[in-house]
Image (cartoon, helix red, strand yellow):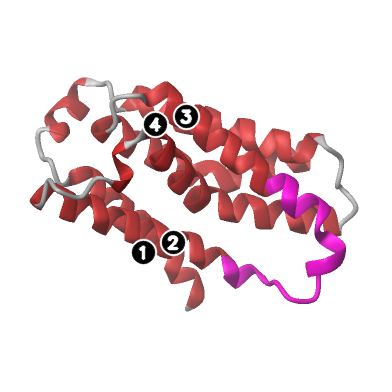
Amino acid sequence: MIYIIITALTVSIDSLICGFSLALSCKKKVAVIFGVALTVFAMCLFANYSTLFLQDKLNEKTVSIGGLILILVGLYNLLKKQNKTITVFNSPLACAITTGFAVGLDGALANLSLSLMGMNAFYVPLIIAVMHAITISVGVLLAQTRIAYKLAKIEFMPPLILIFLGSIKLLGLFI
């Protein structure tokens, strides 16, 4: 059980930074937190029970897809600041699902790895999703500090944080 919790915490660290970024740019934080957690849970549940079909086709480099998605979301949000006519991610649901997929892909792959090791009980995806919800909530709380209010005045900061986080994930392709 400790191994699962440590794994869940490790793959949830990026949610902390995303929570900080979302808190600076999103008005419905609680809806987004629950949406991200549910998206991560669904992805992990799918990974948990599809082990038999995918075990020969996936590797740890697939995590970089989550980084690419974060970069695209960050670029989109950066462009949205320049052009107010883009409206796809204005809904909390779209924001939650997109962010949940981006930060949850490594959690789903970790879940796949755990299930390949025989730890494929229902509580494994639940632990990973709850850990994502906790870390994104901590990020939102950190964003409410005094220094975060100063950073919020810089409108392009949240998209740049997502681009930076996605770039770090993409570095996994080369390391």
Magenta part of the chain: 44-62
Q: Sequence-wise, which precedes: disc 2 or disc 1?
A: 2
Q: Which mark is residue 167?
A: 1
Answer with the quarter of the image where residue 18 lies: top left
Residue found at the far right of this picture: 118
Q: Nearer the viewer, residue 159 or 90?
A: 90
Q: Residue at x 17, y 55 (%)?
A: 79
Tell me whether circle 3 and circle 4 mark residues in contact (CB < 8 Å).
no
Tell me whether circle 2 and circle 1 mark residues in contact (CB < 8 Å).
yes
Q: Residues within 10 Å of mark 1 (few under 14, many from 20)?
A: some
Q: Which mark is residue 33?
A: 3
Identity of the amino acid at label 4? Gly
2 vs 4, front mark: 2
User: x, y percentage for residue 115?
Assistant: 83, 53
Q: Is residue 52 magenta?
A: yes
Q: Is the magenta region chiefly helix, strand or loop? A: helix
Q: Residues within 10 Å of mark 2 (few under 14, many from 20)?
A: many
Q: Residue at x 39, y 41 (%)?
A: 95
2 vs 3, front mark: 3
Q: Is residue 28 magenta?
A: no
The residue pinned by badge 4 equals: 139
User: x, y percentage for residue 138?
Assistant: 44, 26
Q: Residue at x 29, y 54 (%)?
A: 74
The residue pinned by badge 2 equals: 67
Q: CA distance from mark 2 to mark 1?
A: 6 Å
- Please give left or right for residue 92 compared with residue 150 in the image: right
